Image (cartoon, coloured by chain):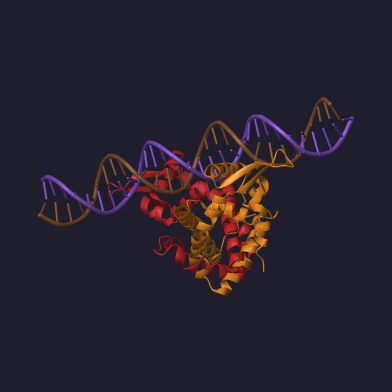
Chain colours: A red, B orange, C purple, D brown
Amino acid sequence: MSTQWLDRRQLAAWVRVASVLEVLPGVLDGQLRRDGGVTLFEYFVLAVLTEAPGGTMRMSALAQQTNATLPRLSNVVRRMESRGLLVRRRADDDARATDVGLTEEGWATTERAAPGHVAAVRHHVVDALTPEQLDQLVAITDALLERLDPTGGMAATYRRYDD
Amino acid sequence: MSTQWLDRRQLAAWVRVASVLEVLPGVLDGQLRRDGGVTLFEYFVLAVLTEAPGGTMRMSALAQQTNATLPRLSNVVRRMESRGLLVRRRADDDARATDVGLTEEGWATTERAAPGHVAAVRHHVVDALTPEQLDQLVAITDALLERLDPTGGMAATYRRYDD
DNA sequence: CCGCTACGGTTGTCGCGACAACCATGGAGG
DNA sequence: CCTCCATGGTTGTCGCGACAACCGTAGCGG
């Protein structure tokens, strides 16, 4: 079959999306590094843990909700533990598994970093759009994630914030 | 001032955007690596050069249009040159500057990789949305880029595809 | 109870991006 | 001309992510 190219409107949309994809993570990551001494992915780990009961979660569960591979998460967690943000502990019910939990400093760091991060998200995303556009964006990203994540691994993370 | 938190709708939108940001690049990058032996950023470099007169461009101009720092671009171009996709040549009019040009194999690689990439973009983005959503997406990403890229560095890249 | 496979994590190697230091050329002012 | 600063790129170091190989434990079949 011959290639089905993109028409002008599709191309316009795609090029812009690609640009956002390229720039946005860098902007947010930079803000968090400066203000909180934490990378964007580390902040995401902290954020997910704060919503977990007892601030503790199993490695594999955390990996799924942060969309990380286990090797990646393992390294990140080890570094964060060495900085005193997290603790690893062998799971009681399964000697293979590891539970990760927030330390006091982990909580404190999250609370310290959150305002700046929220402000950045506001400035660069939320406040840039009208309420209608925000609704449209939810519908659009839902449709995209349907294709991107058919098994629904991350779905558990974002479905929670449904209206 | 106290922190202005996100309401449910804003949070719903943001969490989904973050998820897309996390997943989409990996999906597209993987497809290109498998099918074309090229990374997403390398493909973007090739694509931009394809649209330049003579398939040639100055390093600094290329860096701006691909939203890359000069060091990063320098390394990428060196690797691509060693693979025979590009050539570097000292600029005629400025001995400090470097012109980068596509080789025959660079053109061939781009043409070989393009169909699969377009298909991936179609499948994961374009075809997942209705025509109305595509229009909305253009407006939304425009608004975001306004904030993200106030100097308009990448604007030159995507404004070209306006209707 | 033994052996086998699957699961949950960790570790080693490689390649890439960020940042800073550095080198060469261009251009302006005296 | 010569000095000084700005411009355009390149190179070195460091930290992180991907992938694969590996280790210990669980659970199941015989």
Looking at the figure, which quarter contains the N terminus of chain B? bottom right
Image mark count: 0
Depth check, front residue: A75 or B77 = B77
Looking at the figure, which quarter contains the C terminus of chain B? bottom right
Q: Quadrant of residue A89?
A: top left
> A130 above or below D4?
below
Residue B48, horizontal then vertical, whole percent: 62, 54
Residue B93, horizontal then vertical, whole percent: 74, 42
Question: Would residue B120 be visible to someone looking at this image?
Answer: yes
Residue at left offset 45%, top offset 66%: A147
Depth check, front residue: B121 or B142 = B121
Question: Would residue A160 be visible to someone looking at this image?
Answer: no
Residue at left offset 59%, top offset 65%: A11
Looking at the image, residue B90 sits to the left or right of residue A89; the answer is: right
Residue at left offset 66%, top offset 49%: B57
Looking at the image, residue A9 sits to the left or right of residue C6; the answer is: right
Residue B8, horizontal then vertical, whole percent: 53, 66
Residue B64, horizontal then vertical, whole percent: 66, 50
Depth check, front residue: A154 or B149 = B149
Q: Quadrant of residue A80?
A: top left
Looking at the image, residue B69 sits to the left or right of residue B19; the answer is: right
